[in-house]
Image (cartoon, helix red, strand yellow):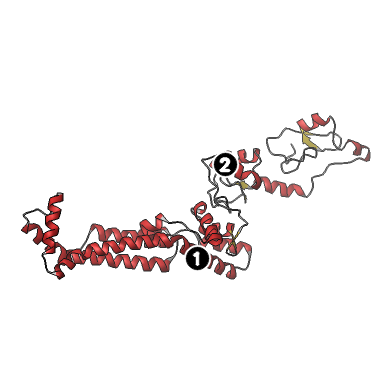
Amino acid sequence: MVDFTGASCPICENIFNELDDIVVCPKCGTPCHRSCYLEKGSCIHEKKHEENFIWRASSKVHDNQKLLEEKICPICFSKNASDAVTCSRCEATISEKTQVQNNKAEEENFNEDNLTNFLTHNFFLTDPLGNVDPEEIIEGIAAKDIAKYVQNSTNYYIPIFKSVGEKNKSKFNFSAFLFSGAWFFYRKQYKLGSIFALITLLLLIFIDLMYYFYTSDIKEKIFKSLDISSSMFLTPSQHIELTKKLLTLPLHEITLYILPDIFQLLIFILMIICGSIGNRQYMKNCLEQINKIKSQSKSENEYNRNLAQNGGIDHPMMWCCLACFLILLIFPF
């Protein structure tokens, strides 16, 4: 049996697939859908039969065959190469398990124009670019190229980058707030990550040293004078007595006692700074790196490949940084 997959029906002009019911004209060999043939009632080339017309596959068949072999992303419905593992637009994973979704997308004829409408009525899906046009220029770079570099959480970062570029408005980044230096490492901002991580690390070391050599002894002395166990949960009245006793100590002892709390406050302030500047600094870093990659790339393929390789996230550095902090918190000096 002849395989017409990749050719198109001359009546409805839709590309044949493996499941189509196809009939072939016995005179000229023109293939068409059975339903199209029955609706028309004859071969579309009937007038050419007297000229001994013979149907031949056009040069477009190969291209159509390639189109059928392209994978459709189950998230943004962009077309990808048949051997693609991730979507070139949103970086979503494209596996065999997504074939049912891909077929549904093809059947419902999804495209760039009705994608937004589809997402509006399907709350469980999110636009990977956060409703930003892939071709929209943000600070001289297309949104789709920024997404290729960011790779993870593009639906969060791309709209923020657009807002910063157009209105100079950003958002507070709670991930940067919670993880400070580790978050900057995670997003491959190694310079800022080193600065914030080093400051936090030094403050934690100072807290441990101060508590071990000074604060613990002063605290034990105060508690002993009040006949209170340091392991007890203090009542409000005991807190008042503790404060009064603390104020009777020499100034240098009071300072040594509260220094660990001051350092803890500095760490919290540092966390707020990280959350406040996180998105802006990440955008600045992304644009600098993308422009650098663009200037060094000799072709479009090399450019896209370098975006994928140099962008994304750095899990090992983040976990290493967090491990150091946890060691200091769990095993103080």
Using residue 13 as the reference point, say whether residue 293 is left or right of it: left
Amino acid carrying mark 2 in the image: Thr
Q: Position of residue 148 (x, y in %)?
A: 55, 57
- Residue 234 in view: no
Query: Mark 1 sits on what residue?
Result: 284
Instruction: Tell me the quarter of the image containing the C terminus.
Output: bottom left
Amino acid carrying mark 1 in the image: Lys
Q: Are marks 2 and 1 in contact (CB under 8 Å)?
A: no
Mark 1 lies on a secondary structure that is: helix
When asked about the image quadrant of residue 175, the answer is bottom left
Query: Mark 2 sits on what residue?
Result: 120
Q: Does residue 55 sit above or below 325 in this rendering?
A: above
Mark sitting earlier along the chain (2/1) = 2
Camera-side residue of 174 and 49: 174
Q: Position of residue 160 (x, y in %)?
A: 51, 56
Using residue 182 as the reference point, say whether residue 116 is left or right of it: right
How far apart, in angstroms, are the residues tagged by discs 2 and 1?
Answer: 31 Å
